[in-house]
Amino acid sequence: MNVDNDKAAQGFAEDSALRPESISFWDGVAIKLGASIGSGILALPFGSRLGGFPALVFWVVLTGTFVAVTMLYVAETSMRTRKPLQLSGLARTYVGSLGSWLMFAAVMINALGALTAYTIGSGDIIGEALGIPHFLGSLIFFVPAVGVVWMGLKVTGVSEKVITFGMVVLLLVLIAATFLGPGIEWRYLAKVSVVQGIPIFSLVLFSFISQYTVPAVARGFAHSGIVHRLPSCIILSQIILGSLFILVVAATLGLAGPEGVTEVATVAWGQALGTWAFVAGSIFTLMAFITSFWAIGETALTNLVDQLKFPSEWQVKYRLIAISLVAVPPFIVAYTDIIGFVDAISFAGAFAGVLMAVIPILMVNGARKHGDREPEWTCGRLAHPAIQGTILVVFTLAAAYTVWSHL
């Protein structure tokens, strides 16, 4: 498809509080990978220890497919909308005020859960390494994290691409060292419990959640003239993520067993493989935290700008307000000791995941009726009512069970 790089010729509007910035295809893939390779992937082995590896694989395949479909709904909705909007803005346009606020709540609660986990985790790692209070370790982590978010989408995309590449290589080295070194006990991976496997859904869903990045990537692709490649970006990212989730759980759970796996997966690697693996695992963990922070922080900030109708994301006063609302609450939650690492992820996944699965269904249906531009790509039969109904039932029931089991 020939696509004119002139954004106006593509039919996208300029009148938005969100500044247009060009990003490449691989910047987009890196943003999506960076958003999902974070606290979720590190918590999956511990969260899967009771339900078992087969249950984890089942949920990765099912949830990853359904999340990809909802992302494609968001992609088509973005392509049918002239004005660059974030998820909450798209929901306001096609679902109404209630849908907009629910989507905004989902984005912000997901961000709060993720950034709280990063605050706890980064403080633990840096604090122990430097022999300083964990609170100061978290502050050291947040300086570069917030700095990149402040500089915007383009800088975020480039930073994600560099760090994500190194992070994936490091992760593959740890996995290879596990299989080629001490190896794994296949009996650990054969155990399964159907009932205890259900709550794994929330952790897997949280790990895959990045619908909020789709409008941002669409905005960057549109300005680069490659918006038609957005579906390929989404599908490729989901395949890479699903493969990594399965490999990480197989390596750590198969290595340490249900009784030996730790709440943060890289700790178990360090205990089993030695000091080098502990150091490598700690570096990977911090890299995973910061790339996820960049992606989630950037989209949370722009959703705040969009939903609260700030005149511009680049007016210093409003950007400072938005950054503060994104970065300060995780410290309050983390250091009042009211929630743990895995619990922060699980609750965020149960609430935000369902809304981010349900509302895009309403959005794409609304955009097909009321969209104001011709899209470069559509979901076609993926938007069939039978598929949409299945997504609604599976996500709602599984999340309800997870919340009930915690209560």
Image (spheres, rainbow, N blue to C red):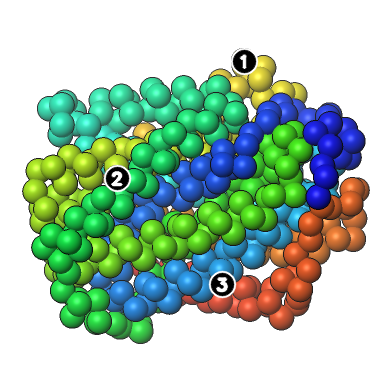
Decide: few, some or many residues near mark 2? Use Cα within 10 Å; few <14, some 14-19, many ≥20: some
Name the residue at 36% across, 39% down. Answer: 166
Residue highlighted by disc 3 = 396
- Badge 3 element: helix
Mark whose residue sits in front, 1 or 2: 2
Q: Say left or right for 312 vs 341.
A: right
Residue 182 appears in which quarter of the rendering?
bottom left
Name the residue at 44% across, 69% down. Answer: 60
Mark whose residue sits in front, 2 or 3: 2
**Which one is nearer the viewer's eye here, 7 or 337?**
7
- Residue 35 seen: no
Disc 2/disc 3 C-alpha distance (Å): 36 Å
Name the residue at 75% across, 64% down. Answer: 379
Residue 16, how many percent across, how many down? 79, 30
Decide: few, some or many residues near mark 1? Use Cα within 10 Å; few <14, some 14-19, many ≥20: few
107 above or below 163? below
Residue closest to the far top: 316
Of pointers 2 and 3, the one earlier in the residue sequence: 2
274 above or below 394? above
Residue 26 appears in which quarter of the rendering?
top right
Residue highlighted by disc 1 = 316
Disc 1/disc 3 C-alpha distance (Å): 40 Å
Quadrant where the C terminus is found in the figure: bottom left
Residue 11, how many percent across, how many down? 89, 40
Of the residues shown, which amino acid type is indicated by label 1? Answer: Val
Of the residues shown, which amino acid type is indicated by label 3? Answer: Thr
Of pointers 1 and 3, the one earlier in the residue sequence: 1
Of the residues shown, which amino acid type is indicated by label 2? Answer: Leu
Q: Are marks 1 and 3 in contact (CB under 8 Å)?
A: no
Name the residue at 86% across, 40% down. Answer: 10
Residue highlighted by disc 2 = 170
Residue 200 appears in which quarter of the rendering?
bottom left
